[in-house]
Image (cartoon, rainbow, N blue to C red):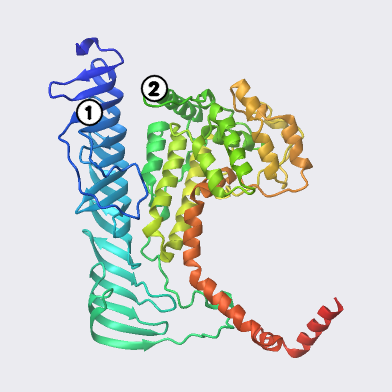
Amino acid sequence: MDRGNMLSRGRLKYPDRKEYIGHFEDGVIEGFGELTVPAEQTTPSIVNSVFFTDTTFDNSTSAKADIYTGCWHNGQINGLVSIRWANGNTYEGYMRDGLRHGHGVQRYAADGELHIYFGGWRAGLRHGYGVASSNRERYLGMWANDLRQGNGAVVSIDGAYHEGTFEKDRLVHGRLLCQAPEGEFGMIYEGDFEKTAFLCGKGVLQVSKYDYIDGHMSGNLINGEVKISNAVFKKRFLANSPLTPVGQSLSDDEPSVGRWAVPSDVKWKEMFEHFLSDDLRIEGCFEENYSYDSLVGVLDHSTIWRSLAGTMTKIRNGINVEKFSFNFDDRLEKIPSFDAPWSNTYYAMVVDYWRTMFTSKRSYLHAIVRHLALLSRRRRGTLRDTQLCYNALCNKFHPLCRLVNGLIEVFTSSYSNIGTHPALYAEVVNELNSVITRLYAVVRLLFTSLPPSGEMHTPVPVCVDRMHTSTDSSEMSAVTASTVSLSSLLGCSTSSSRISNTNDISPSHVSQSSRKSMVSDDLMVLTPACDFIVEHLFAQSYAILFTIYSVSCAEADKRYWDRVIFLNAHTDVKLLTHLEVNRCQGRSLSSDFEEA
């Protein structure tokens, strides 16, 4: 076929058996397409791992070709892509000028092990924050020039936990927490390292809850082979009575981890940058500690909405209908009344758009029927049932939906399986809070009347006396301290069927009956402005959150029950004495209870 006469979509075959199917512009590969490069059939040696449950990675006989699927520009692969090499290795993420650049996920086999890396890339090399996993350990930290560089943490399969500063792929200074059998104390070292597990230089070794050794050390601490010189033995005395109040001693003898943690706002920033620059067409706001809230009211938000709608149209036109069967909801290509005044109906509009983004018209009723069927088979539905139904609703092609699902994926993958370590509990909490805050700030770039990120927990107001629109803001009633109940908000969202008939999402289409129900509910609960994001993220990452919380609180829970058993074995007088309650006051309390 003559390249000059090619249409917008076609097929191009090369003499060396390469084949491209996709879009063209003026005879040049441009847009979405797939390139197949033939290769010899190989069978890579990959060891199955119990730590990875992703079945998309094929460790059997690999394909006979390298397949490049994604966006192309000037004949080179650019933007969001998916690559599957003939040897079984894969890459999914962003590229620039044919090189991995931005956020990406790579799976590859090396030395008989399966390796997975997800995080930042620059010019084909790992750069920025990223997580690298193998069959034996997981690294969560900073990278530079394809090497571990900066602050990071390593969790090993044997339960050892390292955190500290890495230089040229080597741990040089930090902390090591050794795994110990239940009921025993795991040794803790803080100081200089030769590499992970190998001490080299000055440091402090804690061998029990109260005993320390300060000096020069060398050797493998995990294997118990350490040489100590010029050392001083120290002892620390702590109250160890089971009656010690819980709030005073549960953390006294636990190591303070997190000193070398990567700031939460640095994690996954490439994913936010791709969404802002590629989908919303916002440039120049990626400096460190830059606040998205400062952009609200400064940018032309109508242009941002048009860019998002244009991206949706571009994605719909570029999808290969032969491979994907999906019906786009045309409401997502329309611009809602994003500049209407902040009110309960405005919040209902935001929630409707959010749920429409994760739900297609056709799959909405299908998912409800499926969920009811699950509940009919079991008297009490589980969170897993709800999550299965919710996963079926996801519209993975919407840019904001892709960002949300991507953040959930990297968050849960970071702390699952081998990454479930009690020392990472604080990191999990901080990272989840950061993701929620940044997601809310991004949504606020679209819905500008939402409260600022610093006030995202502000309760949703109840103003039901009239409808508020952008042309009637002067007559809006005063915002009260009352809040919308969950059932009321669900009532607002049920009006989505009416909205779908009008093909519009705006406060004016929220039903009057839904607004009236907001003040007639018997049970009123506080609903923060960020509730729709928190609800979704918690539902999708609940298993990881619950598991790491249980692991981190196991020791504290054991000590709590030890104290309960200890107190039950003694009289009330001993308890009152411990609580520093004098006997006279204790008798008056007892008499009051008897009279009651």
Q: Give the labeled residue for mark 2.
A: 321
Q: Against 390, is 257 above or below? A: below
Would residue 350 be seen by someone viewing this image from the given angle?
no
- Residue to which mark 1 is pinned: 36
- What amino acid type should be assigned to the residue bearing mark 1? Thr
Instruction: Name which residue lies at 47% across and 30% down.
Output: 304
Judging depth in this view, the residue of 195 and 471 nearest the camera is 195
Circle 2 crowding by C-alpha within 10 Å: few under 14, some 14–19, many from 20: few
Left or right of 523? Residue 424 is left
Residue 217 vs residue 555: left or right? Answer: left
| 104 is higher (above) or lower (below) than 237 | above
Gap between marks 1 and 2, in whole Å? 18 Å
Name the quadrant containing residue 363: top right
Between 104 and 60, the one lying in front of the other is: 60
- Tell me whether the residue at label 1 lies in contact with that at label 2, contact meaning CB atoms closer than 8 angstroms: no
Q: Tell whether 247 sits left or right of 319.
A: right
Front one among 293 and 322 = 322
Identified at 76% across, 35% down, the residue is 516
Residue 190 location, x and y as percent?
Answer: 32, 74
**Residue 186 falls in image quadrant:** bottom left
The quadrant the C terminus occupies is: bottom right
